[in-house]
């Protein structure tokens, strides 16, 4: 059976969150296509992960057999997160743009799971080739050619970190203009926001189905 690791990081609950609604569509398609599969879910806003500290970070550079009892104790929760990622056949991440970048809760998760020599700058990385689907919602548009294209620090950062750094296969779904519904000055953009939202849900459903099929096939091989 294949395993999907699903992370949400929006501080908006339920349908109030564009990223959560799209990750839910992806997950529903995955579970419909692969009902016997496993889904590991983490709500990084409701249940945030502790920030990485000096002792825990240092323990990651020590062979487990040589860690002190104190190092082993603080490293154990971090190791559990890393092994959880490594167990996944596919990863789904809700990554809404907050002040032009990812949420601090998602950044903390990344800080905890990334370890040089194991998955970062490692040959091979323990997560090399694993598909990761990122729902990168945003209130406006930061596409190339738009006035705020230079403020885009979500796609660029995650493509570099997950793709170039960890060797994962990164695929983005981008619902944009979500603030059009609540910002009077953006009201004329509501039709474009509607189209973007519909397109994101369609992409999520299609990619969720395909990801489940491919992961199940690989797990059975």
Image (spheres, rainbow, N blue to C red):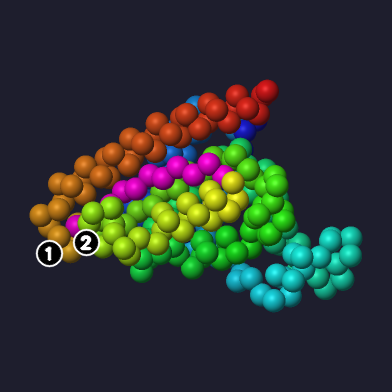
Residue 191 is left or right of residue 122, and the answer is left
Instruction: Say how many tags the image has.
Output: 2
Boundaries of the magenta span: 168-180
* Position of 145 relative to 209 (above/below): below
Res 168 quadrant in image: top right
* Position of 119 relative to 199 (above/below): below
> What residue is pinned by disc 1?
185
Viewer-closest of 27 and 149: 149
What is the residue that sits farthest to the left in this orientation?
Answer: 188
- Work out whether mark 1 precedes mark 2 in sequence or the reverse, and give the earlier one: 2
**Percent from the top left, x then y, of residue 187?**
12, 57
Question: Magenta segment: does it hold 214?
Answer: no
Question: Magenta segment: does it hold 175?
Answer: yes
**Local crowd at mark 2 within 10 Å, few (<14), some, or many (≥20)?**
few
> What residue is pinned by disc 2?
147
Secondary structure, mark 2, is loop
């Amino acid at each position: 059976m294949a395993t999907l690791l699903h992370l949400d990081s929006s501080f908006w609950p339920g349908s109030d969150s564009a990223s959560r609604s799209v990750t839910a569509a992806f997950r529903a398609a995955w579970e419909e296509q692969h009902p016997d599969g496993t889904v590991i879910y983490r709500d990084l806003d409701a249940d945030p992960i502790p920030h990485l500290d000096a002792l825990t970070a240092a323990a990651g550079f020590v062979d487990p057999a040589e860690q002190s009892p104190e190092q082993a104790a603080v490293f154990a929760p971090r190791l559990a997160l890393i092994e959880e990622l490594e167990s996944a056949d596919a990863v789904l991440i809700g990554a809404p743009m907050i002040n032009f970048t990812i949420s601090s809760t998602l950044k903390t998760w990344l800080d905890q799971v990334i370890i040089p020599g194991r998955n970062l700058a490692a040959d091979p990385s323990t997560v090399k080739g694993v598909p990761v689907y990122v729902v990168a919602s945003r209130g406006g548009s930061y596409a190339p050619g738009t006035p705020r294209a230079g403020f885009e620090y979500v796609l660029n950062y995650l493509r570099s970190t997950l793709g170039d750094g960890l060797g994962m296969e990164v695929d983005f779904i981008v619902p944009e203009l979500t603030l059009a519904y609540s910002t009077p000055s953006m009201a004329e953009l509501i039709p474009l926001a509607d189209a973007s939202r519909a397109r994101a849900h369609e992409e999520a459903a299609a990619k969720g189905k395909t990801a489940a099929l491919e992961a199940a096939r690989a797990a059975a091989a």
